[in-house]
Amino acid sequence: MEAWFKPPKDKIIGVIGAAFFLGLALMLWQSGERTEESSWFGRQPTPTTGSPAPVATTAATDGAKINRGSELAGQEKLVEERVASALARIAGVGQADVRISLAQGTVSEYAINTNGNNRKVEERDKQGGTRVTSDATDTRQVVVLKEGGTGAQEKPVVVREMRYQVAGVLVVADGAKDPAIKEQIARAVSTLLDVPAHKVSIFAREVSK
């Protein structure tokens, strides 16, 4: 009787396998339900390890451009105030308004080593005449220094480095109607900013009626 009621082993294994797959399906269904619920409330599922995170490069680039523009405008205002203050001290200029346009870009001035050689050759011909020949050479070479030991890279010696270049200057002054005062203003601006005269424009202030 006991052998007749004893279930076969294959049937037991089949029941266990069915229970296993049923439990696995239930776990997967619950996981999908949690993911759907999180997306409803605005919480995105955690990305996998291999997915790259977005990088806001555009915002960083725009911010750098704004900073450079603000720095340039600040430099222009600072130089304008200093030049206007200096011009106001010149007799006959009166009140002066200065506007300066700066161009961004670093300009370096390097140390130059100059070697000059003058040679004179005096020749006499058979008739007693004398001919003198002069030969002058001028060699200019940039001074370089080696940083480090043997085989180091050579770098030129920088004497002066300017971050901004003056693109143009506009001066409106009370005394600019006088040609002599106008000439003094032009020389003062050229000296202060180290700019050629063609970059400086000077006008007399309009007299209000």
Image (spheres, rainbow, N blue to C red):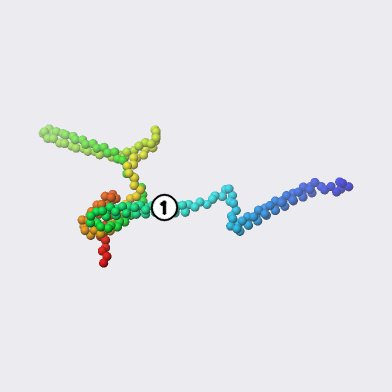
- Name which residue lies at 54% across and 49% down: 52
Query: For the view shown, which residue lies furthest in the bottom direction?
Result: 209
Query: For the view shown, which residue lies furthest in the left direction?
Result: 127
| x and y, in percent, of residue 72 in the image | 37, 52
| x and y, in percent, of residue 33 in the image | 65, 56
Instruction: Report helix, strand or loop for mark 1.
Output: helix
- Compared across the picture, whether 74 is left or right of 87 comes to right
Q: Quadrant of residue 100?
A: bottom left
- Compared across the picture, whether 128 is left or right of 147 comes to left
- Name which residue lies at 70% across and 51% down: 24
| Front residue of 135 and 87 | 87
Q: Dot 1: few (<14), some (14–19), or many (≥20) neighbours within 10 Å? A: few
Query: What residue would you read off at disc 1?
Result: 67
| x and y, in percent, of residue 53 in the image | 54, 50
Quarter of the image with the C terminus in it? bottom left
| Front residue of 203 and 90 | 90
Q: Quadrant of residue 69?
A: bottom left
| Front residue of 84 and 131 | 84
**Residue kind at label 1, given as amino acid type:** Asn
